[in-house]
Structure formats: structure tokens, C-alpha cells
Amino acid sequence: MGKLTALGVKTAKPGRHADGDGLYLLVKPSGARSWVLRVQSDGKRRDVGLGGVEMSSRVTLKPTDEDPLPVPLLHRRILTLAEAREKSGLLRGAAKAGMDPIAERDRERTSVPTFAKAAAAAHQALKDGWADKGANTFIRSLETHAYPAMGTIRVDKITSADITTALTPIWTSKPDMARKVRQRIGTVLNFAHGKGWRPTEAPGRSVTVGLPRQPKGGNYEAMPYADVPSFVADLVAAPPTTGRAALLFLIFTAARPGEVRRAAWGQIDDAKADWNRPSSIMKGIDAPPHTVTLNSAALAVLSDRRPSSAKADTLIFGNTAGGMISDMTMNKVLRTAGLSYDAHAFRSSFRDWAAEKMPEIPDPVAEAAIAHVVPDKVVRAYKRTVFLEMRRKLLEAWGKFVMGGADAG
């Protein structure tokens, strides 16, 4: 039981007045009153200021409609006798646990940001170690998929349930993106933990407990390579549209949809018949630039699309406003034709054809043609010399095959 009383606090004369357990009331000659905790920390005696004295007889309220945001005890700067005793007990316990009571007091007073502000801070601090594309993708994916559910929540209050809520809309419909967003949320929360904004790192397994099982595999449905020439013939015969032209170019080059959507005239080397793709349009944060050899079929598509004049950054398959076409544009061409295949999977059609119809071309060459990393370091050393011409032969044969040359292989 403490020695001081509420009345004694009000009437105390200047000086230091002990309550017990290291808690003191300090009264200055001016009459100003404050609370101090004397505690042993790391073998040293220290005085920890707790705050000023609340002179009224108010009662601490619980959360109600009238008091929806009560200030946590360690955040309070003006304390009643009862609150001073409780706060001193918390900090005394921290000291006994080996923690710095002053650091704990000040940590609690630090302003804790929302998830959106913490994400912006993490992005700013970490982006110099990422490629530009990776840094931009990091923050954009969080703005799109995490901010709506948890952007305004204080980062120290975010739970597994909040993360699950953010991921639910895309967990099964966009499993790859959902996994990336989950990882990026974890990066932000771990960064916040390191800054002292939250007491724990990102939650682990508990996040997925409330989420359904994602589709197995994740492979795109690919058109059998034997059916590709007939489909290409239908595309060529149909009225020309940007979507059809982009899909034809994707098939002829065995490229990814995102690479075709970002293809610009400045990337095309007409003299060498090459498409020099910068790392900014490649898959992966640290993907290197990649050169695609353009076969006759791909060059024909470009010839039909080429404007009389265009800037280097003008998109080859841009929409009517000059921006990128939607990531669903090429798949819509397939759906209109009544097909369930995915545009991305024409790479798989090409790869199967190369394995079965071009056995004289080594597998690493075919892998390099679709911008996969060649695992063998010795073989990889020849990519810039031998591989490019072998890939040119391979893709030219593929172009002839899909344009109806059944014996192109």
C-alpha cells in the first residue's frame, strides 16, 4: 500500500515525497508537481520521469462511444496517483526483465505510423537495393491489394486476420500475385519491427489458416503445338486488331504477354532483325536484358504495324490512347474463338515443338530462346556467340511451322 493519498498529493510541500516501490512525488517551489520512478537498471540507480500530476479527481474511463480512443497508460503525460503507481509498476517490471525503462517509456511515446506510411518508409529505405522495376512493383502491388483492407490501420495493430482479409480477394483468382503481396506485407511488418513500431515480426503460418487452398500446379493451359498453325491461320484471316496482332507477335517470338505489351519501337533493331528487350520489361526484379531474334513472320507483323514516324518509347501494340493494352487483351482473342488456352502458354507450345521437331538444337538453346536461365555455366558462356545464331535458326523454323509450313521442323 502506498504512503501517499490523493489529498496528500494536492497539499504536499516542496520537496521529494516517497510513495513506495521507488515512486516519488516531486514538488517544486513554484508548486509544479511531477512523478519520478527511482529504479535499478544495469546495476545503476536511475530516475525515470513519468509525467506531471493530475490534480483533479477524474476516474480513468474505459472505451465507450463518448471516449472511443483512450490514451494508453504509457502514452499519458499527466497522471493521477493511481495511474502513476500503475505506470511505475510497468517500467519497474521492464527494468527487472533487463530492459531500459527510459527506452521503453520513450518507445511507447513514439508515433506509430499506419501500414500505408510504414510501407512508404520501407520502400524508400530499401529501394536502392532493388532494380527500378522491382521497386515500383513492390509499392504498386501493395497500393492495389493491401491498402484497401489495411492501409489505414496502425502498423502495430495489424494482425493475421487483417492480412488474411487483404489477401482473400486474390488468393485463388491471382495466386502468384497473392503470394507476392503476402511476402511484401511481411517485408513491411518486419521493417516496422526493426524500427520499433511494432513488438513482433510479421505473422507466419496463422495468415493462411483462414485462406482456402490455392489451385494446384499453377501452369497455364497450353495449346498443343500441332494445333497452333490452324489457329494462326484463323488469326491472319480475321480482321486486324491490336489484340490479334499482339497475339500473333507473341506466338512468333515465344514471348511473355507482359513483354509484348511493353514492346516499343526503340527496342527493334531492323538491320539485325532483333528485338532487344531491356530488363525493365523482363520477368523478375533482377532479370537481365534479353535479345529475341525476329523471324520472318514476326517481322511481317511489325511491318504492318509500323507508323510513318514514332518515338523510341512508342508502344508497338499500344491502345488507342497510346498506353499499354490490358493484360487480358490477348486472352480475350482466345476466348472469342471459344478456346480456354492462355496466351502465356504459347511458350510451352513452342518448347514442346522444339523438343520434338528440332532435336538437333540443344535444349539450352531452346531454353535461352524463351529467356530462361541456362543452368550450366560453361554452356552459358557461349550464349552471346553461338547461341544467338542457333536461336535465330530455331525461331525461323518455328515461324515457318506456325504459318503453315508443316515440314518446317
Image: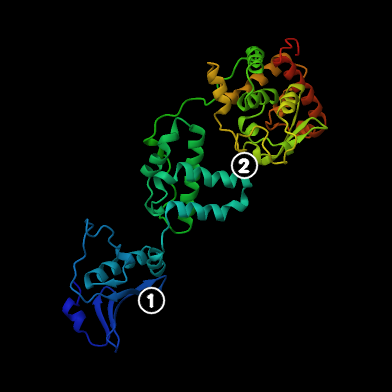
Q: Can residue 331 be spotted in the picture? A: yes
At horizontal 30% and vertical 63% (from top left) the residue drawn is 71
Question: Farthest front residue?
Answer: 308
Q: Quadrant of the image for the C terminus?
A: top right
Residue annotated with mark 1: 45
At horizontal 78% and vertical 25% (from top left) the residue drawn is 392
Q: Which colour scheme is used?
A: rainbow
188 displayed left or right of 314: left
**Disc 2 residue crowd, few under 14, some 14–19, many 20+, Cα 10 Å:** some
Q: Nearer the viewer, residue 22 or 51?
A: 51
The answer to which quarter of the image holds residue 257 is: top right
Residue annotated with mark 2: 285
346 displayed left or right of 408: left
The answer to which quarter of the image holds residue 255 is: top right
Q: Position of residue 39 (x, y in %)?
A: 34, 73
Q: Quadrant of the image for the N terminus?
A: bottom left
Question: Farthest top residue?
Answer: 406
Q: Is residue 145 above or below residue 255?
A: below
Q: How far apart are marks 2 and 1 (CA)?
A: 52 Å
Dot 2 lies on which element? loop
**Amino acid type assigned to the residue bearing label 2 in the image:** Ile
At horizontal 62% and vertical 23% (from top left) the residue drawn is 244
Q: Are the two marked residues, 2 and 1, in contact with CB atoms closer than 8 angstroms?
A: no
Q: Position of residue 206 (x, y in %)?
A: 39, 40
Q: Can residue 206 be spotted in the picture? A: no
Q: Position of residue 174 (x, y in %)?
A: 48, 32
**Amino acid type assigned to the residue bearing label 1 in the image:** Arg
**Dot placed on the residue nearer the N-terminal end, 2 or 1:** 1
